[in-house]
């Protein structure tokens, strides 16, 4: 089963400095049919104006992954971590027992991110944060694990959950396949480009909720950048 969720069907809000689209219920957007997808709780498509951002605020018991699509995001937290993550790269914050952080676009142009939250398997652990570059050439024509709690994904940023976040870039006409247990919950969003997934066409920034499929075969109808979450139930 693949359910296409068109970009124009997403929830969202425009806060002036922030134009947010929500694939799942979040903040003032509530849809009982879109509460979560397995352990995947949040997928926000955020556009952040220059020299603005999220002021310090707390989190606990959540794995929070930021995939930067355009521009850069600067993170700072009460653990003393500070870092700038640029387009194509990823940061992971394991909120654990509690963390307070800010995320600012300190650039002169807009920043666009995917903010992805996944429920953790383990609780009661200290919070942590990390960022890592992922050159797009390395994921040309194939999926690469960017963040993962699955054994064997040693090059990915660590997650405290049975899930992985993957990225791929495809040239128009290229195809990539991803195989997984049909009991898993997968969610795919093309950050850029139009693609076909097992015969279903997705426009850029559409979502595809995938369940009871042994594999997905994705063909780029134009140059595309893909982000895929593979999570437990």
Image (spheres, rainbow, N blue to C red):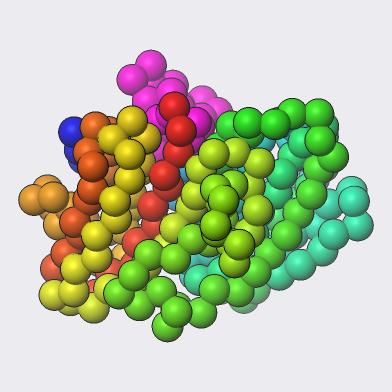
Q: In which quadrant will I find the C terminus?
A: top left
Q: In which quadrant will I find the N terminus?
A: top left
* Residue at figure coordinates x 60%, y 38% from the top left: 161
Furthest residue to the left? 199
Furthest residue to the top? 32
* Residue at figure coordinates x 40%, y 30% from the top left: 37
Name the chief secondary structure element in magenta.
loop
Indicate yes or no whether the magenta region holds residue 28: yes
Indicate yes or no whether the magenta region holds residue 10: no
* Residue at figure coordinates x 24%, y 32% from the top left: 212
* Residue at figure coordinates x 35%, y 77% from the top left: 140
Residue 35, position as x, y percentages in the image: 43, 23
Residue 12 or residue 67, whichever sits in front: 67
Furthest residue to the bottom? 137
Residue 206 or residue 132, whichever sits in front: 132
Q: Is 3 left, or right, of 184 in this rendering?
A: left
Magenta segment: 15-42
Confirm whether residue 21 shows in the render.
Answer: no
Residue 182, position as x, y percentages in the image: 28, 35
Residue 82, position as x, y percentages in the image: 82, 63
| For residue 194, above or below residue 27 | below
| For residue 96, above or below residue 112 | above
Q: Is 178 left, or right, of 195 in this rendering?
A: right
Total numbered circles: 0
Q: Is 25 left, or right, of 216 in this rendering?
A: right
Residue 101, position as x, y percentages in the image: 79, 47
Furthest residue to the front? 152
């Amino acid at each position: 089963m693949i359910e296409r969720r068109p970009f124009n069907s997403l929830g969202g809000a425009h806060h002036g400095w922030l134009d947010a689209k929500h694939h799942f219920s979040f903040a003032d957007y509530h849809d009982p049919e879109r509460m979560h997808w397995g352990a995947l709780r949040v997928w926000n498509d955020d556009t952040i104006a220059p020299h603005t951002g999220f002021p310090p605020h707390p989190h606990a018991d959540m794995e929070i992954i930021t995939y930067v699509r355009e521009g850069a995001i600067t993170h700072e937290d009460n653990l003393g971590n500070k870092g700038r993550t640029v387009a194509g790269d990823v940061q992971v914050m394991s909120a654990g027992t509690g963390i307070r952080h800010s995320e600012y676009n300190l650039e002169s142009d807009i920043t666009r991110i995917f903010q992805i939250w996944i429920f953790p398997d383990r609780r009661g652990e200290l919070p942590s944060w990390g960022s890592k570059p992922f050159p797009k050439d390395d994921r040309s024509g194939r999926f690469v694990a960017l963040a993962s709690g699955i054994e064997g994904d040693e090059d990915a940023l660590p997650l405290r959950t049975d899930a992985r976040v993957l990225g791929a870039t495809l040239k128009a006409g290229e195809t990539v396949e991803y195989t997984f247990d049909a009991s898993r919950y997968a969610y795919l969003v093309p950050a850029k480009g139009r693609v076909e997934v097992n015969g279903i066409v997705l426009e850029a920034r559409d979502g595809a909720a995938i369940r009871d499929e042994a594999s997905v075969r994705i063909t780029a109808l134009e140059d595309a950048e893909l982000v895929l979450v593979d999570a437990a139930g």
